[in-house]
Amino acid sequence: MVDSVVERMERIIIERRLPAGYRFGTKQELCEQFGIAPATLGEALRVLRGRGVIEARPGPGGGLFVTERSPRLRLAHSVMRLREHGATVNEVVAVLDALDEAVISDAAVHRTDEDLKDLDDLMEQVAAVWHDPVDGLHANWKPQRRIAETMRYCAPST
């Protein structure tokens, strides 16, 4: 039951393109809307908060609000949903490959001079061992990891 509530709430946010800061409702309103018990909603909200989808704001005018998620977090959840729905490893890799350009473009917009220097150094390391399939593969992950770190630092603070 909790999984279906989580999925329904995420689907509403995605399909309606609800922006960050949108007031989703109060706990009471959501229990009534989804026809569920407060305990079920509480567990669903725990999952959604853990995923960075919803945040609770107390006080007058408070309630549950849609959060701004970082590109990296959105990507991770998209990949997890693919796996949950039976996608094969090859299908997930194909999706990741298709997203590489968007991820790199986002990192390029937010990069610093230090990021560029680090990436240059890492690419030299890749070039030095590329002839060896195992060492080349391991070295190739380091620039990708560094690009992901660049994106992490550009994520909006909440």
Image: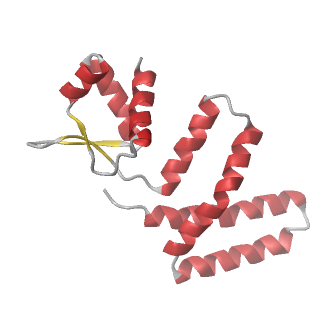
Looking at the image, the residue that sits furthest to the front is 16
Instruction: Locate the N terminus by quadrant.
Output: top left
Q: Position of residue 94 (x, y in %)?
A: 73, 47
Q: Viewed as shown, does residue 110 lie left or right of 85? A: left
Q: Position of residue 4 (x, y in %)?
A: 44, 22
- 36 lies above or below 131: above
Residue for point 90% across, 63% down: 132
Q: Viewed as shown, does residue 40 lie left or right of 15? A: left
Q: Position of residue 96 (x, y in %)?
A: 67, 51
Q: Position of residue 11 (x, y in %)?
A: 44, 34
Residue for point 29% across, 16% down: 35
Q: Viewed as shown, does residue 11 lie left or right of 131? A: left
Task: Looking at the picture, tell me which residue is in the foreground, 158 or 137.
Answer: 158
Name the quadrant containing residue 105. bottom right
- 93 lies above or below 1: below
Looking at the image, the residue that sits furthest to the left is 60
Name the quadrant containing residue 89. top right
Task: Looking at the picture, tell me which residue is in the foreground, 87 or 52.
Answer: 87
